[in-house]
Amino acid sequence: MNKYEVAIWVFMLAAFLGFELIRRVSPLLHTPLMSLTNAISAIAVVGAILITGAKDASLFTRILGFIAVVASTTNVVSGYLITDRMLKMFKKRTPEKH
């Protein structure tokens, strides 16, 4: 096996394992899990910026890096908005005084 075949196998195993773990999470843990995945996506943004900005990066690498930056940034922003909305659902509402 060459290194690309190994990388594909590791990716497939990680995707399957991640899917199974997230599928079995209790609804009470969705907000902390979303916060954790936001942090992981933020690390992906930094990595994609480093790869895209490398001085010896090819055009293909720069295009894929740009796509990764956009996708990860969208994921981070959307995740934080969803987490904030979910947390607001648990706040007690005070009755309005007239």
Image (tube, rainbow, N blue to C red):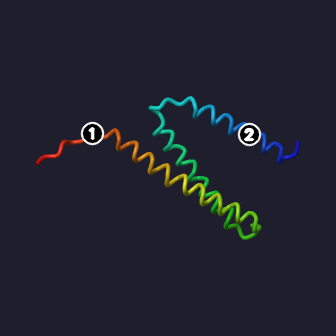
Residue 54: which disc? none
- Asked if residue 4 lies left or right of residue 68, the reply is right
2 and 1 marks in contact (CB < 8 Å): no
Q: How far, Cα to Cα, is label 2 from label 1?
A: 43 Å
Q: Secondary structure at mark 2?
A: helix
Dot 2 amino acid type: Met
Residue 95: image location, x then y, percent: 18, 42
The answer to which quarter of the image holds residue 6 is: top right
Q: Spot the residue most to the right.
A: 1
Earlier sequence position, callout 2 versus callout 1: 2
The picture quadrant where one finds residue 11 is: top right
Residue closer to the observer: 98 or 37: 98
Q: Amino acid at mark 1?
A: Lys
Mark 1 lies on a secondary structure that is: loop
Q: In which image quadrant can residue 28 be found?
A: top left
Q: Which mark is on residue 12?
A: 2
The residue under the point 63% across, 31% down is 20
Name the residue furthest left. Answer: 98
The disc label shown at residue 92, or none: 1
Residue at point 52%, 43% (across, down): 36
2 to the left or right of 51: right
Coordinates of residue 60 in the picture (x, y in percent): 76, 64
Position of residue 79 relative to residue 19, above or below, is below
Give percent across and percent down for residue 69.
61, 60
Image quadrant holding the N terminus, namely top right
